[in-house]
Amino acid sequence: MSGNKNFLVSGGGTGGHIFPALSIANEIRRRVADANILFVGAEGRMEMEKVPAAGYEIKGLPITGFDRKRPWRNVKVLWMLWQSMRKANTILDEFKPAIAIGVGGFASGPMLKAAQKRGIPTLLQEQNSFAGVTNKLLAEKARCICVAYEGMEKFFPADKIVLTGNPVRQNLLDCDKTQQQARAELGLDPTKRTVLIVGGSLGARTMNESVIAGLGRIAATPDVQVLWQSGKYYDEQCRKALEQSGAKNVLQTAFIAHMDLAYRAADLVVSRAGASSISELQILGKPSVLVPSPNVAEDHQTKNAMALVNKNAALMVRDAEAMDKLITTMLTTVEDESLLQSLGENVKKMALTDSAANIVDKVLEIIGLNKDE
């Protein structure tokens, strides 16, 4: 055993990459005395704010994704990739990690590639049912690949795959409020059926437009109430539309600080189908209507959603059909107690618990530290 307790965690770009990365880091910190953890992200992306707020140091690489629709712009991307590889090597020289952990996203490509070239062991965490390009490129030389779905052998070497699930935010599991208490604390009616609509921290245009178009129908269903996270980009537009509609059973907000209360309050969740959202729905056993984003690589959100739909564990409305179908599906579902119960039971069966602990078990095994060093 080398005694090196330097852990490098790389990736980001969205909350779906950042939340699992932070959960893994928190578990390392809990288990390994004197662990030294460094994050590497992409300059200008969400992780450069979220990671320091969680108490960790982060360095940024000047990296972005390839533009598949406008390939002539990729000359600049290749230049940024070369710069990022240089900076990644400087980080390795200075930090000397025992292991590099990649969670997907722009920065994990050059960072883990540089580590692999030096013989530093790497572990990948793949959140989606359809593997990302970065992790597929890194898989051959990775020591272990932690996945959240069965059947990932079509993307990765079978002997490297470990089914661990995706880590979720611990505070979601620690909520001790009843459903009625959670509703009251959020300013909702404790007695009404409740739908949580959430399109991510930045918002989701199609989902918001569908809600705006359906405000009249929601207002005409007074036994149902809606908690609507519109995202900061769409806050003013959605607030004005709600005021004009006169709907009294909709509470709109740009951002929900206490997602533990929001999930607890909800009978039904309407959400995008990002990997972290899916894992949270599974762990909490929440019925859902999923609206996969069409603006992601390889359409992986649709594949994530279908993994649930095929097990009768969620309903799906395609983004292109949301204006016509979303509100109808939402209102019909939240008032169908039998359907809510079966969706909740089926999605709960898909949950993989203790994901962060299981991933860290593999991390410590790879570098030769005892599981509670």
Image (cartoon, rainbow, N blue to C red):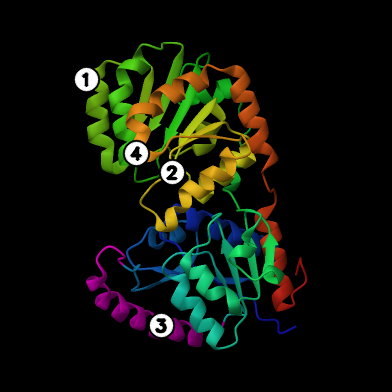
Q: Which residues are magenta?
A: 67-96
Q: Is residue 247 left or right of residue 5?
A: left
Crowding at label 3, few (<14), some or many (≥20) Cα neighbours within 10 Å?
A: many
Q: Amino acid at mark 2?
A: Pro
Instruction: State the CA–CA distance, disc 2 to disc 1.
Output: 29 Å
Q: Amino acid at mark 3?
A: Met
Q: Are marks 3 and 1 in contact (CB under 8 Å)?
A: no
Q: Which residue is mark 1?
A: 244
Q: Which residue is mark 2?
A: 292
Instruction: State the CA–CA distance, disc 4 to disc 3.
Output: 39 Å
Instruction: State the CA–CA distance, disc 1 to disc 4.
Output: 26 Å
Vertical arrangement, residue 249 with respect to residue 93, above or below: above
Residue 364: where, in percent of width, then height? 71, 71
Instruction: State the CA–CA distance, disc 2 to disc 4.
Output: 10 Å
Q: Quadrant of the N terminus?
A: bottom right
Residue 324: where, in percent of width, then height? 34, 27
Crowding at label 4, few (<14), some or many (≥20) Cα neighbours within 10 Å?
A: few
Vertical arrangement, residue 352 with respect to residue 25, above or below: above
Discs 1/4, front: 4
First in sequence: mark 3 vs mark 1: 3
> At numbered mark 3, what does the secondary structure look like: helix, strand or loop?
helix
Q: Are marks 3 and 2 in contact (CB under 8 Å)?
A: no
Q: Are marks 1 and 4 in contact (CB under 8 Å)?
A: no
> At numbered mark 4, what does the secondary structure look like: helix, strand or loop?
helix
Q: Which residue is mark 3?
A: 85
Discs 3/2, front: 2
Whether residue 73 appears in magenta in the rendering, the answer is: yes
Instruction: State the CA–CA distance, disc 3 to disc 1.
Output: 52 Å
Q: How many marks?
A: 4
Q: Residue at x 55, y 88 (%)?
A: 118
Q: Which residue is mark 4?
A: 320
Q: Amino acid at mark 1?
A: Gln
